[in-house]
Image (cartoon, grey):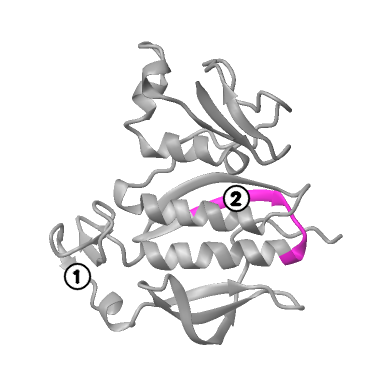
């Protein structure tokens, strides 16, 4: 028997696996997680192929965040843990009735970049930015191939994040010298929003030292709801 746990109705239990169903067996909510024994999955079921693609598994484990996203995250295996941490933080930030959907997730200039849309209160919007910032910081110092601590390398006009074992090209001196400094978007009472600089501690997966404002900048996501 397959197992399910629904965050909408709060129920959990077992059910007979149905490849056509992706919602809660009790309340039909999409905000549900399934655990399916491999021997219960039919031989021709797409899940057999999905098991080899962590991006598909990630989207299936966090359906509330990927309801409208059609493409898989364009990321390598080494950033899987970073994405898992990000999804959990975003789910904890969301309130009942609010919506959040990833639109596109890519690696850009050696950093995880997530485009999103949603209907949120300003307070939640700030918490989403607080969730995105450490994910971006962690990605910039995590090998895209294996997940070990790494740094940015420049090769073939592309910036990659690699550990010593997977190093390619030449290291970016700027990345080595900045002590894991990372710009963070924060919400302030006035607009435009402000960019601050924080120092990221990879072991703690958190920012340390007080923030320092450096400039005003537009947000990465949609404007928060006024009401």
- Residue 67, image x and y in percent? 61, 36
From the viewer's side, name the closer residue of 71 and 142: 142
From the viewer's side, name the closer residue of 144 and 40: 40
* Residue 116: image tag: 2
Q: Quadrant of residue 110?
A: bottom left
For the magenta stretch, what is the residue range?
Answer: 114-123
Residue drawn at 59 percent across, 61 percent down: 220
* Direction from residue 157 to residue 125 in the image, left or right: right
Residue drawn at 41 percent across, 19 percent down: 46
Badge 1 is on which residue? 171
* Direction from residue 15 to residue 39 in the image, left or right: left
Is the residue marked by circle 1 packed among few (<14), some (14-19), or many (20+) residues within 10 Å?
some
* Residue 15: image tag: none
Residue drawn at 23 percent across, 78 percent down: 173
Report, in whole angstroms, how far the alpha carbon at label 2 lies from the one at label 1.
Answer: 31 Å
Residue drawn at 71 percent across, 25 percent down: 26
Q: Main secondary structure of the magenta part?
A: strand
Q: Is residue 104 magenta?
A: no
- Residue 56, image x and y in percent? 43, 34
Q: How many marks?
A: 2
Q: Outermost residue, right direction?
A: 227
Helix, strand or loop at mark 1? strand
Helix, strand or loop at mark 2? strand
As drawn, 214 above or below 134: below
């Amino acid at each position: 028997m397959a197992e399910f746990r629904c965050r909408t109705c709060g129920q959990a239990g077992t059910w007979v696996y149905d490849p056509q169903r992706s919602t809660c067996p009790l309340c039909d909510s999409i905000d549900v997680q399934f655990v399916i024994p491999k021997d219960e999955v039919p031989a021709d079921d797409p899940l057999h192929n999905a098991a080899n693609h962590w991006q598909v598994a990630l989207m299936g484990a966090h359906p509330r965040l990927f309801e409208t996203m059609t493409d898989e995250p364009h990321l390598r295996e080494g950033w899987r843990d970073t994405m898992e941490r990000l999804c959990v933080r975003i789910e904890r930030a969301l309130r009942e009735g609010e919506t959040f959907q990833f639109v596109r997730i890519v690696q850009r200039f050696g950093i995880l970049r997530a485009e999103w849309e949603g209907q949120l209160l300003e307070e939640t919007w700030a918490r989403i930015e607080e969730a995105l910032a450490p994910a971006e910081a962690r990605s910039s110092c995590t090998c895209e191939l294996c997940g070990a601590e790494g740094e940015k390398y420049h090769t073939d006009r592309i910036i990659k994040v690699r550990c010593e074992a997977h190093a390619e090209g030449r290291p970016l001196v700027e990345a080595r010298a900045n002590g894991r400094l990372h710009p963070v978007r924060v919400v302030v009472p006035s607009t435009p929003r402000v960019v601050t600089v924080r120092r990221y501690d990879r072991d703690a997966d958190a920012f340390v030292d007080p923030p320092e404002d450096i400039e005003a900048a537009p947000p990465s996501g949609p404007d928060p709801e006024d009401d």
